[in-house]
Structure formats: C-alpha cells, structure tokens
C-alpha cells in the first residue's frame, strides 16, 4: 500500500544514523510500517554490510532457545546465563522427577508416621543419590554431548548439578519433615546420610559411572540400615547422635578424597 506523503530524504538519512528524535521518530516508524516505497528507499540508504549484520542478529535472536522456568529462576538468583542453561538441562530437575520425589517422600513419611520412622529416614537419603545418577552421563542425560563440549571442567559441572539436585531434594525432604511433627527431632536424621551418600556416589562415579555408582551406594545403604536395625533395638543406630557423628566424619573423609582425585573426572572415559 502506497501513501501520498513520504519521508523526506533528510529524515531517511537521520533515521539510518539513529539521529531522528521523537516525535519524528515515531512518525517515521509508523510510516515505514505502511509504506513499501519508503522502506525500499531506507534499504538503499543503508550499507549492505549493516543490513547483513542486522539480519544475522535477527536470525540469532529468533533461533535462540527460550529459557524455561528453572533457567529463569536461576538467572534471577544471580547464576550466569550459560551455567543456568546447563543446570536447567539436568534431567533430575524436571517437573516429572520432582513430582516423583515429592510423592515418594510423602508416602515414606506417611509410612513412618503410621508405623516406623525408619522408613522415611531410609528413603529420604536415597533420593539425591538417584538424582546424582541422572545428572550426568551418556545414557541418562540427553544433553550430555552438549555439556561435554561446554567451556567448563567436567568436575565443576557435575558438582553444580549435584549441588542443585541435593538442594532441591533437601528442601522437599525438609518440607515433608515439617509436615510430620510427631516424629520430633529424629525426623531430620536423613540429612547427614544424604550428604554422605551423595559424596560417596560422586567419588565412585569416575570409576564405575554415575548409574552403577548410585546403585552400589544405594544397595550398601539399605544393607547398612537393615543390618544395624536387625542387630539393635528400637531402630538403627545410624540415626542416633553417635551414628550421625560417624556419618559426618565419613562425609568429610570422602569429600577430601574426592577433592584430591578431581582430575579423574577429566579422563577420556567420560563415565562411559
């Protein structure tokens, strides 16, 4: 559609130089949107390199993936964009996984309040271990190849993802704990086991891979709780103060081992 009035040549030049001020700028924008002739004149007044650069910027903007709710939340919390994108791609931070974790926690807490709290205390530490198993690896992470070529050490990326998983599961476990006040202080006995099992799983990951390491740690934890509960009376001594101190010391020792052997995460095996 053409119009009777067209932009003067001086306004076209000032528009290209970004020197046209409102309200003339607003009038020019409205006119260019409706006038093909003035748009053609505008294209002729712009350097071809500038037009090409503008189209390339537009293509990049259109092709850029839209951040999801988790990524936007991480960015608002101060996490850099590239790190937030890698963290948001963690399979164990998806809504389906979080819903499964919440359902498992609620069910185990209900069983603990109705029968024996050891059911809840045993199950809660296993959830971050399962999350770690799904955090990184060619068989479980659909973004594994992308994360592999990211300008970030594998050890740091895995720590970031595991910290995110542990934080989420800890918050959910704490919320469920507050919902069952009848258990008292014993209800928070899952926290140190969660740390111990997560760090142990990380320490075994370079050697066995995330899934095998998580399965081994989980089975070892179930065997430990089962054996100590059968040998003692009134529950497992793992959840009494003395047992918690032992778990804390074990966590520190395994964490020191993990920090000392962090280069094992950068080997060519890459958890295959």
Image (cartoon, helix red, strand yellow):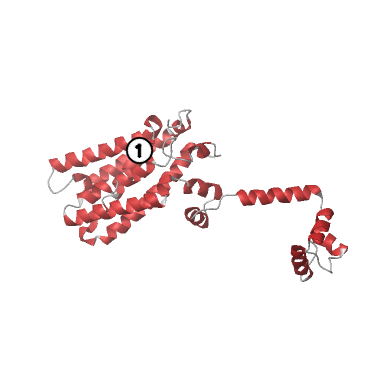
User: Residue, x 77% and y 50% (percent of image)?
Assistant: 50
Q: Residue 227, how many percent across, how many down?
A: 17, 39
Image vertical order of residue 133 relative to residue 94, above or below: above
Residue 17 visible = no
Q: Quadrant of the C terminus?
A: top left
Front one among 129 and 18: 18
Residue 231 is left or right of residue 155, and the answer is left
Q: What percent of the width, then of the height, locates residue 230? A: 14, 41
- Residue at point 77% right, 71% down? 23
Q: Residues within 10 Å of mark 1 (few under 14, many from 20)?
A: many
Image height check: is 30 above or below 254? below
Residue 45 seen in the current view: yes
Please identify the residue farthest to the top as the structure is shown. 268
Identify the residue at the far front of this view: 1
Q: How many marks?
A: 1
Image quarter in which the N terminus is found: bottom right
| Relative horizontal placement of residue 162, taking residue 217 as reference (left or right) | right
Residue that numbered label 1 is attached to: 201
Whether residue 213 is situated above or below residue 38 in the rendered picture: above
């Amino acid at each position: 559609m053409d119009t009777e009035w067209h932009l003067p040549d001086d306004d076209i030049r000032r528009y290209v130089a970004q020197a046209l001020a409102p309200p003339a700028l607003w009038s020019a924008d409205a006119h260019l949107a409706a006038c093909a002739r003035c748009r053609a004149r505008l294209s002729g007044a712009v350097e071809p390199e500038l037009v090409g650069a503008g189209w390339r910027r537009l293509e990049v903007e259109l092709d850029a993936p839209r951040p999801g709710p988790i990524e936007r939340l991480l960015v608002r919390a101060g996490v850099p964009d590239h790190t937030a994108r890698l963290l948001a791609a963690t399979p164990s931070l998806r809504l389906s996984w979080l819903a499964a974790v919440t359902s498992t926690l609620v069910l185990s807490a209900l069983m603990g309040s109705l029968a024996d709290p050891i059911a809840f205390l045993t199950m809660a530490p296993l959830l971050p271990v399962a999350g770690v198993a799904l955090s990184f690896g060619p068989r479980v992470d659909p973004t594994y190849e992308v994360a592999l070529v990211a300008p970030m050490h594998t050890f740091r990326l895995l720590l970031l993802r595991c910290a995110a998983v542990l934080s989420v599961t800890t918050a959910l476990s704490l919320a469920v704990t507050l919902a069952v006040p009848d258990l008292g202080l014993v209800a928070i006995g899952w926290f140190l086991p969660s740390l111990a099992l997560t760090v142990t799983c990380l320490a075994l990951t370079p050697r066995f891979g995330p899934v095998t390491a998580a399965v081994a740690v989980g089975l070892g934890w179930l065997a430990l709780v089962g054996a100590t509960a059968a040998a003692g009376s009134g529950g497992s001594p793992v959840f009494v103060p003395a047992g918690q101190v032992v778990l804390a010391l074990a966590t520190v020792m395994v964490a020191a081992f993990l920090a000392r052997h962090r280069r094992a995460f950068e080997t060519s095996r890459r958890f295959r």
